[in-house]
Image: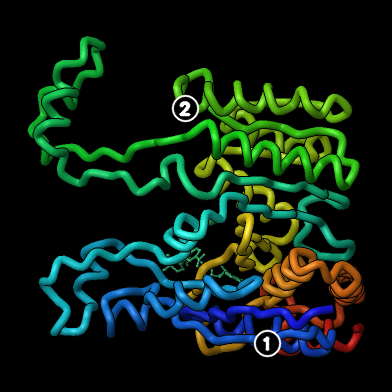
Amino acid sequence: MKRHKIAWLPGDGIGGEVLEAARIVLDKLNLNAEYIDGDIGWEFWRKEGDPFPQRTIDLLKGVDAAMFGAITSKPVKAAESELSPELKGKGLIYRSPIVRMRQLFDLYICFRPCKAYEGNPLNYKENIDLAVFRENTEDLYAGVEFNTVPDELAKTLSKLSKPFAPFQSLSPDQYAISVKINTRKSSERIVRAAFEFAKKFRRKKVTVVHKANVVRATDGMFLEVAREVAKEYPDIQLDDANIDAMCMWLLKNPYNYDVLVAPNLYGDIISDLCAQMVGGLGFGCSGNIGDKLAVFEPTHGSAPKYAGQYKVNPIATILAAKMMLEWLGETEKAEVLEKAVKEVVKEGKVRTYDMGGQSKTLDMAHAVAAKL
Ligand code: NAI
Ligand code: MG
């Protein structure tokens, strides 16, 4: 096997702690890899005015995969106030580096497997095994937003014949607009990714999550595209549900669902719900996958209140490392690693605070490593 080049991006808060844990496990697996540290996060926003510096972008252009911890994000005004004095007033605007990374590298698939490992006291029900595919580059996250609505746009909107009402008589600084943009191309490729996964792992059903009855243009198109793609997979059942109903049905009977696919925002929501059913943020792992690059991360954030305490659960990040091994073609190592996680969870001797125990982040990593 070749030597893999992996960008290592700890980021902020607990990001570095959970990545340290993942590295203990990868080293025990003897993964033939070169790890290259990259700068990302709040510190670089404050000092340099950019939380995702060009040198990190360049680093990502030359690697096979990346592991990412977490970053701290703050609203625009709070972010500006923390800039170092010489950068203030220059009109720098904070944008989440992970959202930017997904768009810049066209990491269009966000894959979030949610499995209930036996013996996890946090399981909502046993044997849940859901796979969420979330579109990762557009939708309401496209970044087309107006805090103050430009005059021309305001004029156009005020002329619309439909009775959209209150805002049409407001001055442009009294409302804001975030645009939901979905393309056929991205809708098609995320649905195809879900079906390809279902085909490869003999899963029976793909459920499209949307709100097409109300958000007709964008979600209507997403659903239409999904129906077209589904025709190419006659052995896999296509199902669809509104996002709101889906949240209820998932809780009522998670066993009715298998693979889920959704535009960006609904995918974000539904994947947190699914993660909570299998142990919460300490278990939610995520892959941002494109054609050339894939970046793996826990779904949780930087958890500032626990930063520096080595207290949080690293399993989400260890499972993200397992996903990275699959992406790198190291399927045997990925299987061995998942088996080790299963054993540790089942034994229940090492448990972090979220699981009701007192073990620390690195205790968990060493417990997993000991099974490898
Ligand atoms: P968070 O996910 O960082 O933490 C929320 C709470 O979840 C924590 O206080 C803790 O109780 C629990 N938690 C998180 N990770 C855990 C783990 N591994 N084990 C056990 N418990 C865990 O979300 P929060 O507090 O809303 O955001 C904190 C910062 O992180 C914000 O600046 C936010 O913007 C950022 N964020 C970054 C993300 C990313 O880097 N992809 C994703 C989500 C939030
Ligand atoms: Mg989220």
- Residue 121 x %, y %: 80, 64
Element under disc 2: helix
- Is 107 left, or right, of 44 in this rendering? right
Task: Work out whether residue 32 or residue 344 is closer to the camera in this orientation and state it.
Answer: 32
Quadrant hosting residue 296: bottom right
**Residue 256 visible from this viewpoint:** yes
Residue visible at 72% across and 32% down in the picture: 207
Residue 159 has which mark? Answer: none
Q: Nearer the viewer, mark 2 or mark 1?
A: 1
Residue visible at 72% across and 52% down in the picture: 277
What whole-number distance in Å separates the C-alpha atoms at marks 2 and 1?
42 Å
The reply to whether the residue tagged 2 has its Cβ within 8 angstroms of ligand 2 is no
The residue indicated by pointer 2 is: 218
Against 235, residue 199 (above or below) is: below
Q: Quadrant of the C terminus?
A: bottom right
The reply to whether the residue tagged 1 has its Cβ within 8 angstroms of ligand 1 is no
The residue indicated by pointer 1 is: 34
Mark 1 residue crowding within 10 angstroms, few (<14) / some (14–19) / many (20+): few
Mark 2 residue crowding within 10 angstroms, few (<14) / some (14–19) / many (20+): many
Kind of residue at disc 2: Thr
Quadrant hosting residue 250: top right
Task: Work out whether residue 128 or residue 15 is closer to the camera in this orientation and state it.
Answer: 15
- Residue 145 x %, y %: 28, 44
Kind of residue at disc 1: Glu
- Residue 190 x %, y %: 63, 41
Residue positioned most to the top: 161
- Is 80 left, or right, of 240 in this rendering? left
